[in-house]
């Protein structure tokens, strides 16, 4: 892995994160993902290319963006405010560059490893005192394997622990190389749906590579203990008895010890609209159903279970 790019597009860096691995962490959200989850809560990070995103509440109605757009893709509507014709927009971002109110802005910014670690190191004292570190998330980190591999190495030189947050869809050899690194202490591994037909319908890809990579990590004593499974739970999609039981059987078979349950939330809907598009709205399982799933993993499989992100 010697061909790491100079920089990658970073959607945001979230400091003082407490749900992206142990301790206090800085989470880096990389742009680009090979999955197209219909419930994605960061849909603006799916496309690996730069995009224009709107923040309508910031708009002061000055109309400057209309004047500077070379493609004539920006208009003002008395009821809707700024309207972007995405078919005309070539993502030159001139409107965003000159938007004083930041109502129009790029989704992400290019950052080098030095840029990321400069921010990450600001909170090293908190990491050291709480067992934290940086978490590399997305999008999907395996889409940027060369860059992330080098980032992990450079973080290690600074004494920073790293958590990998991944859907598991990527090159197996590159994945294992990163997972084996000494300063990678945790791997948050998504389980969208164990049923391949459901997985294809709702994410756009088969889960076969994901399951193969999971088995690979679970079978190696050097990486098995780093694994925590993360399961988004969407009512009527992946919360059925059949899917939950089959998932549990897999976890028992490969020796999974920890599971995070993430009930669906609709925070991605406005983000999708603001990058130009529409996202389907789902529901989270009832509290009763969440408790049933929690108790199954906890009591029948003796797993450590947390329910995160309730809204």
Image: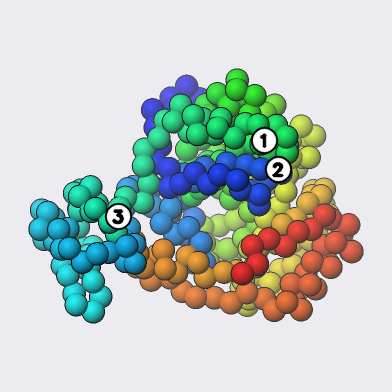
| Residue occupied by mark 2 | 23
Q: Dots 1 and 3: beta carbons under 8 Å? A: no
Q: Earlier in the sequence, mark 3 or mark 2?
A: 2
Q: Dots 1 and 2: beta carbons under 8 Å? A: yes
Applied colour scheme: rainbow
Say if residue 47 shows up in the picture. yes
Q: Nearer the viewer, residue 251 or 114?
A: 114
Label 1: how many residues lie within 10 Å, few (<14), some (14-19) or many (20+)? many
| Residue occupied by mark 3 | 102
Residue 205 image position (x, y, % from top left): 51, 57
Q: Earlier in the sequence, mark 1 or mark 3?
A: 3
| Mark 1 → mark 3, Cα distance in angstroms | 32 Å
| Mark 3 → mark 2, Cα distance in angstroms | 33 Å
| Residue occupied by mark 1 | 127
Label 2: how many residues lie within 10 Å, few (<14), some (14-19) or many (20+)? some
Residue 85 image position (x, y, % from top left): 20, 65
- Secondary structure, mark 2, is loop
Q: Residue at the location (52% across, 70% down)?
A: 266
Q: Is residue 292 above or below residue 217?
A: below
How many marks can you see?
Answer: 3
Residue 151 image position (x, y, % from top left): 53, 29
Q: Residue at the location (43% across, 54% down)?
A: 46
From the viewer's perspective, tell me whether residue 52 is left or right of residue 168: left
Q: Quadrant of residue 112?
A: top left
């Amino acid at each position: 892995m010697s061909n790491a790019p100079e920089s990658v597009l970073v959607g945001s860096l979230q400091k003082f994160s407490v749900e992206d691995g142990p301790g206090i962490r800085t989470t880096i959200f990389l742009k680009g993902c090979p999955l197209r989850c219909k419930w994605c809560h960061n849909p603006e990070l799916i496309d690996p290319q730069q995009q224009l995103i709107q923040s309508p509440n910031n708009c002061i109605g000055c109309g400057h963006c209309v004047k500077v757009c070379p493609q004539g893709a920006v208009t003002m509507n008395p009821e809707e405010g700024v309207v972007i014709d995405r078919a005309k927009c070539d993502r030159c971002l001139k409107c965003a560059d000159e938007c004083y109110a930041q109502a129009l802005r790029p989704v992400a910014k290019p950052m080098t490893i030095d840029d990321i670690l400069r921010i990450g190191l600001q909170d090293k004292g908190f990491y050291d005192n709480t067992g934290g570190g940086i978490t590399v998330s997305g999008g999907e980190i395996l889409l940027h394997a060369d860059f992330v591999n080098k980032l992990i190495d450079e973080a290690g030189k600074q004494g920073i622990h790293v958590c990998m947050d991944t859907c598991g869809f990527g090159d197996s050899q590159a994945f294992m190389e990163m997972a084996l690194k000494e300063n990678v202490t945790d791997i948050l591994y998504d389980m969208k749906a164990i049923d391949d037909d459901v997985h294809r319908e709702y994410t756009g890809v088969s889960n076969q590579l994901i399951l193969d990579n999971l088995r690979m990590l679970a079978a190696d004593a050097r990486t098995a203990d780093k694994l925590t499974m993360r399961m988004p739970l969407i009512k009527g999609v992946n919360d059925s008895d059949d899917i939950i039981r089959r998932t549990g059987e897999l976890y028992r078979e490969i020796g999974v010890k920890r599971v995070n349950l993430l009930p669906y939330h609709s925070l991605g809907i406005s983000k999708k609209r603001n990058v130009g598009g529409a996202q389907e709205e789902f529901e989270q399982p009832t509290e009763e159903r969440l408790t049933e799933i929690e108790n199954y993993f906890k009591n029948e499989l003796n797993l450590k279970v947390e329910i995160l992100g309730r809204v």
